[in-house]
Amino acid sequence: MIDAIRACQHHEVGLTWIPVSPLWRTLRKVCNTHVFASMKLDATQYLRRNKIQELVANVGESCHKGEAIKIGQAVFDTTINLLSNTIFSVDLADPNLSSAQEFRKIVCDIMVEAGALFWILFSTLLKAVSRSLIKLLSQNCFW
């Protein structure tokens, strides 16, 4: 578990981070029943359509101006806004607000930290496997 998640005890109450447990089942049930139920999603379909239209309009505007399109930023903003509109009825990733840019940076920093942790674990495992494989291949060469 990365320190950024432990810092505010998100690993104890965050649906993404907690292990399967009675709390996890309760939170998942609440999400399935009240947030992501078919009727709720159908009722807010216009919000999702609106966010996709905004994405297409922003891409079109950038193309018209001859500007490069930051695909990662555009997808991040659209995804966050889709989720935040579904849950909170507000855009969390308005590119004109400094708080949205700060939020994006925090999320990216957490992703980088989490990725670094997994890379460290993966590279450690890879070293152990490669050492064993080299030893095995070397033994076969000298027998």
Image (cartoon, rainbow, N blue to C red):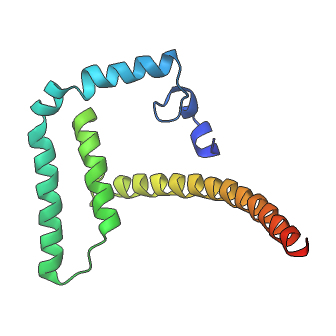
- Answer above or below: position of 83 versus 139: above
The image quarter containing residue 30 is top left
Question: Quick check: 91 left or right of 22?
Answer: left
The image quarter containing residue 112 is bottom right
Q: Quadrant of the C terminus?
A: bottom right
Of 22 and 81, the residue lying toward us = 22
Tally of marks: 0
Who's the residue at 74% across and 58% down the image?
A: 124
- Answer above or below: position of 60 versus 3: below
Residue 61 in view, yes or no: yes
Who's the residue at 57% across and 56% down the image?
A: 115
Who's the residue at 39% across and 24% down the image?
A: 28
Which percent across, then down, holds residue 121? 69, 53
Of 109 and 17, the residue lying toward us = 17
Who's the residue at 25% across and 29% down the image?
A: 36
Question: Quick check: 75 left or right of 132?
Answer: left
Question: Quick check: 123 left or right of 64?
Answer: right
| Residue located farthest toward the bottom when viewing the structure as drawn | 66
